[in-house]
Image (cartoon, coloured by chain):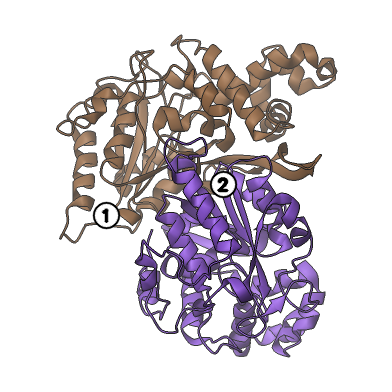
Chain colours: A brown, B purple
C-alpha cells in the first residue's frame, strides 16, 4: 500500500507522556470526571470481583468528531470535501451547471447545510466517488499534509484532544479493544486513525458509501461509487456496533445527540458500564457549544438525560488541563 | 449475554491435536496442497526476507459454507430456516395463505429454490426477523443442540472440516488474524463461530439483514427487521472486506464461484499472497460436487481460473487424511 508511505510523512502528535503507569491521564485535572473513569476501569479489571469483565468483552466505542478531534467551524471531512472541490474545479468546468457545487465554490456553506442530505450527497459524489480506496486515501493524506485549521493554524490531525488520546491508551493498557463509531466516513478516518489514534482500520466504523468490485483488464479494482450506503449516526450507531462488532460495548464516549443512542445501548440496564459525554465549554482554548445554532455537534437531549443515565459529563474547561498536543511532535501510539 | 450459557451446553469439536508445533496439520496428507500452504506461511513469517509480512497485515479470509463446514444437501442456515418454519407453523395459522411458506411446510424445497431471492426473503422474514439478536441467537443455539445432519447424523456444528480447523489454528499460531467472509448470515454464524472455530464475532463477516434500534419502555432494543441489507457473496465479498477490514488480505480460502472475487482481490498482482480452493471430490466421506446441478456451491469458473491464478486446489479425497472431527469432543480453540 502506498498509503503508509504517504502517512510516514505526516507530522503527528506526541503521546510520550502516556507511557507513565503511575499517572496515565496527565492531561486530566483531578475531579469527578477523571475519578469516574478511573473507578470504572479499576472495577472491570480487578480480578475475583463481581464487576470483573473478561478482556474479550472490554469493548469501548468512541465517537470521532467532537470527541477525539474538533468538529468546528465545520466537521473536518466536510472541509476536506469543500477544499477538494475548490482544488479540482479548474479541471471540471462542467461543475458550473451544478448549483450545489457552485455554492461550494462560492463559499456559501450555509446554503450547502440548508440543502440537507441531497446537497451533501452531491458534494460527496464529486469529492469522494469515482476513485479507488487507495486513490481516495492518497487525496486525504495529501490534504492532511497541507491543509490547516483556520483558527488553530495546525494540520487537522493535530486538532485532536490530548486527554482523549490518553484515554485511548489508558483503556488499551487495560486490555480494552477500542473502536471508533463515527458519523464520519470510514474510508476518510482510516487514513489517519492508525497513526493518530493507534486504531487499526478494522476498528474504525463509520458511514460508508457504495463501492463496486470489478475485474478490469484482468486486474481487481474497487471503485467508490456515488451514494451513501449507511449513515453511522444516531440510531444507526447501535446498528453499526451490532453489525461490525457483534457485541454490546461496556464503555462509550461521545459529545453530541448523535451519540445518545449508542450511549443508551452501552449503558442502560448494563452493570458495569460507563458513558462519557465531552461537553464543549471552553471558548477560549477550543469552542463552547451545545445548543449554539451555527455549531456542528448539537448536545441537547443527551445532556438532559445524562444525570438519569449516570453518564459522566466532562466539562472541558475545568476537567482538561491541556486540550491539544504540542504541535509537530510524533505519535508513538500503537495497538 | 445468555448466549454464552446456551453455547456452554454445546457439544463441539475437538482440536487437541492442533497444539502440536511439530506437525501443525495432522489431518492433511503430504502433497502439493499442504506443501504450498506451509511454504507460503514460512515465506511471510521469516524475518529479514523480502517476503516477510508484518503481523498487522497477515489477514486471512475464509468462506464458511463448503470451506469450513459442509453445505449439502442444503446450506445449513437454510435447513435452520426451514426447520424453524416447521416448528413455528402451529402458532402461525396465517402462514397457510403464503404460498412460499406453504411450500416449505410441504417439503417442496425445489420450489423454494426456484423462487429465487423473493422466496428466500420471505423465508428469512418469518424465520429470522422480528427478533432481537439475542432471541435469534438463542433459537439458533437451541436448534444446534437438537438438529442433526440427515446423512452424517451429528449436530451441524460438528460437520466442520478438521483439516480446516487445523489451518485456522496454524495461521493464528503464525500471528494471522483470521476472518470469516461468507454468504451466510453474520448473526447466524456468530452463534457458533467463536466456540467452533475460535473466531470472535467482530471477525465474522456475512450477509446481514436490516435492523432497527429503539428505546422501548426506556430500554434499548435492537430488532432484526425484514429485508436483506447486504449479500456477502461474489463481488460483494471484496466490498465487505473493504468495509469491515479496510485492508486487502494476503490469504483466502474458498470453495465455490462465490469466492472467486475475493480470491482475485487477495491474490492478483499481490506477492506474497495465497489462494486455496477446497474441491469437493470425496463422495464417500463427504460429497463430490462442483458442476452438479442439484448441489449447493457451484465451482466452475474459479476452478477454470485456478491454474493461471496460481490458486492451490485441494483434492479433498487425496489431500485430507480426515474430513470431520470425532463427534462429541470438545473444542479448545481460542483466538
Residue A63 higher or lower than A156, as above or below: below
Residue on which the image places disc 2: B250
In the structure shown, which secondary structural element does the residue marked by tag 2 occupy? loop
Residue on which the image places disc 1: A272
In the structure shown, which secondary structural element does the residue marked by tag 1 occupy? loop
Which of the 4 quarters of the picture holds residue B91? bottom right
Of the pair B24 and B188, the residue shown nearer to us: B24
Q: Residue furthest front?
A: B31
x%, y% of residue A75? 53, 25
C-beta proximity under 8 Å, tags 1 and 2: no
Of the pair B243 and A278, the residue shown nearer to us: B243
Q: Are marks 1 and 2 on the same chain?
A: no
Q: Is residue A75 visible?
A: no
Write the residue at 53% across / 18% down: A144
Write the residue at 67% across / 88% down: B93
Instruction: Please state the chain letter of the residue tagged with numbered disc 1 in the rendered image.
Output: A
Of the pair A323 and A256, the residue shown nearer to us: A323
Q: Is residue B94 visible?
A: yes
Amino acid at each position: 500500500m502506498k498509503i503508509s508511505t504517504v502517512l510516514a510523512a505526516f507530522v503527528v502528535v506526541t503521546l510520550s507522556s502516556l507511557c507513565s503507569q503511575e499517572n496515565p491521564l496527565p492531561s486530566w485535572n483531578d475531579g469527578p470526571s477523571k475519578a469516574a473513569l478511573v473507578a470504572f476501569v479499576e472495577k472491570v479489571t480487578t480480578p475475583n470481583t463481581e464487576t470483573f469483565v473478561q478482556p474479550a468483552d472490554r469493548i469501548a466505542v468512541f465517537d470521532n468528531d467532537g470527541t477525539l478531534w474538533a468538529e468546528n467551524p465545520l466537521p473536518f471531512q466536510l472541509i476536506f470535501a469543500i477544499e477538494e472541490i475548490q482544488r479540482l474545479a479548474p479541471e471540471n468546468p462542467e461543475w458550473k451547471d451544478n448549483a450545489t457545487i457552485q455554492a461550494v465554490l462560492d463559499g456559501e456553506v450555509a446554503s450547502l447545510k440548508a440543502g440537507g442530505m441531497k446537497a451533501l450527497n452531491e458534494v460527496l459524489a464529486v469529492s469522494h466517488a469515482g476513485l479507488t480506496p487507495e486513490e481516495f486515501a492518497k487525496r486525504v493524506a495529501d490534504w492532511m499534509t497541507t491543509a490547516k485549521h483556520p483558527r488553530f493554524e495546525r494540520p487537522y490531525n493535530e486538532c485532536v484532544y490530548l486527554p482523549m488520546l490518553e484515554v485511548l491508551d489508558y483503556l488499551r493498557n487495560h486490555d480494552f479493544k477500542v473502536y471508533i463509531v463515527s458519523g464520519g466516513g470510514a474510508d476518510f478516518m482510516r487514513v489517519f486513525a492508525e497513526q493518530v489514534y493507534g486504531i487499526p482500520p478494522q476498528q474504525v466504523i463509520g458511514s460508508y458509501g457504495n463501492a463496486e468490485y470489478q475485474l478490469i483488464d484482468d486486474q481487481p479494482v474497487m471503485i467508490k461509487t456515488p451514494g451513501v450506503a449507511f449513515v453511522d449516526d444516531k440510531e444507526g450507531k447501535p446498528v453499526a456496533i451490532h453489525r461490525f462488532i457483534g457485541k454490546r460495548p461496556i464503555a462509550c464516549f461521545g459529545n453530541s445527540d448523535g451519540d445518545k443512542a449508542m450511549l443508551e445501548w452501552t449503558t442502560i440496564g448494563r452493570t458495569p458500564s460507563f458513558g462519557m459525554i465531552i461537553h464543549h465549554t471552553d471558548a477560549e482554548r477550543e469552542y463552547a457549544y451545545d445548543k449554539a445554532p451555527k455549531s456542528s455537534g448539537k448536545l441537547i437531549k443527551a445532556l438532559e438525560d445524562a444525570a438519569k443515565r449516570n453518564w459522566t459529563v466532562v466539562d472541558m474547561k475545568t476537567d482538561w488541563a491541556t486540550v491539544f498536543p504540542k504541535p509537530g511532535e510524533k505519535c508513538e501510539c500503537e495497538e
